[in-house]
Amino acid sequence: MLDIENLSYSTPDTEIFTGLDLSVHTGESVVLCGPSGTGKTTLLTCVLGLTKPKSGRIRIAGEDVTGLSRKQLALYRRKHMGMVFQFGELLPELSPVENVALAALLAGVDRGSAYDSARALLSDLGVPPGQTPTAYLSGGERQRTAVARALITGAPLILADEPTGALDRESRDSVADLLFELPRRRRCALLIVTHDQAVAGRADRRFDLVAGRLVGDRA
Ligand SMILES: Nc1ncnc2c1ncn2[C@@H]1O[C@H](COP(=O)(O)OP(=O)(O)OP(=O)(O)O)[C@@H](O)[C@H]1O
């Protein structure tokens, strides 16, 4: 589902990573760890098409996304990728169902279907129904809502950046349970960046980004 080939990125002062190769297949979870500042988030933003790599190729579902225009990328992202951030990044004044339905509406789904799917997905992921703005939910409930938002369009590639970094241990475990079930339950590919060793240990494969190189399991 995701094929990264010979990817390099540098800032004007520093080479962040060089010649990275990484594949994530449908039905599996891959975790990316490594010291702070080695470029893990930058790698995710390259996959999302928000950062342009210096060289190399990223293919998603067989399509080379490194050559797409910004507009094509935005459309491609909506259809093929779901993203979960550390702090959920939800709209705090909207309820969970509104946050999740909004992602479907932006992807062109009609209002009735968007709301029906959002309610069904949130119920499946254990988010209490109701009109409470997400600002008042617990951290775990917010992250479950963020996972629902990432899934609502049926994206085959789910990316997560420190999805449990802001949670206590109990919420961390339940959000990790939810995330690691996804590849098999929903036939997607999952790539998670995390510093949390308990979360990292649950992935099918693990890599560490150290000094610009990936170290670890191979595809
Ligand atoms: N556009 C940019 N201009 C300058 N520096 C950048 C740019 N993008 C990334 N960097 C630098 O690249 C390095 C990698 O940052 P990144 O956030 O990807 O690391 P990380 O491995 O995710 O770190 P952490 O684990 O702390 O979240 C950092 O030193 C960051 O400041």
Image (tube, rainbow, N blue to C red):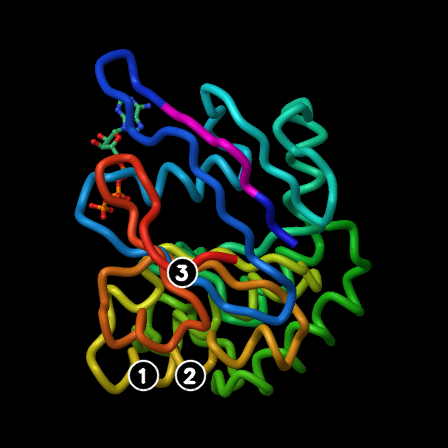
Classed neighbour count for the residue bearing mark 3: other residues with Cα under 10 Å, few (<14), some (14–19), many (≥20): few
Circles 2 and 1 in contact, beta carbons < 8 Å: yes
Picture quarter with ligand 1:
top left
Q: Position of residue 180 (x, y in %)?
A: 47, 77
**Which label sits in the foreground, 2 or 3?**
3
Sequence-first disc among 3 and 1: 1
- 120 versus 142 height, above or below: below
Q: Position of residue 188 (x, y in %)?
A: 64, 66
Classify mark 3 as within 8 Å of ligand 1 or not, answering yes or no.
Answer: no
- What is the CA distance from the residue labelled 2 to the residue labelled 3? 22 Å
Q: Which residue is more in the foreground, 213 or 149?
A: 213
Sequence-first disc among 2 and 3: 2
Q: Which residue is mark 1?
A: 173
**Going 58% across and 86% down the picture, which residue do you hit?**
123
Quick check: is 90 in the magenta stretch?
A: no
Classify mark 1 as within 8 Å of ligand 1 or not, answering yes or no.
Answer: no
- What is the CA distance from the residue labelled 2 to the residue labelled 1? 6 Å
- 23 versus 55 height, above or below: below
* Snapshot quadrant of residue 165: bottom left
- Asked whether, in this view, residue 57 is left or right of residue 42, the answer is right
Q: SS of the residue at dot 1?
A: helix
Q: Which mark is residue 177?
A: 2
- What is the CA distance from the residue labelled 3 to the residue labelled 1? 24 Å
Write down the region rendered in magenta: 4-9
* Snapshot quadrant of residue 57: top right
Circles 2 and 3 in contact, beta carbons < 8 Å: no
Q: Which residue is mark 3?
A: 217
Classed neighbour count for the residue bearing mark 2: other residues with Cα under 10 Å, few (<14), some (14–19), many (≥20): few
- Asked whether, in this view, residue 134 is left or right of residue 86, the answer is right
- Asked whether, in this view, residue 78 is left or right of residue 178, the answer is right
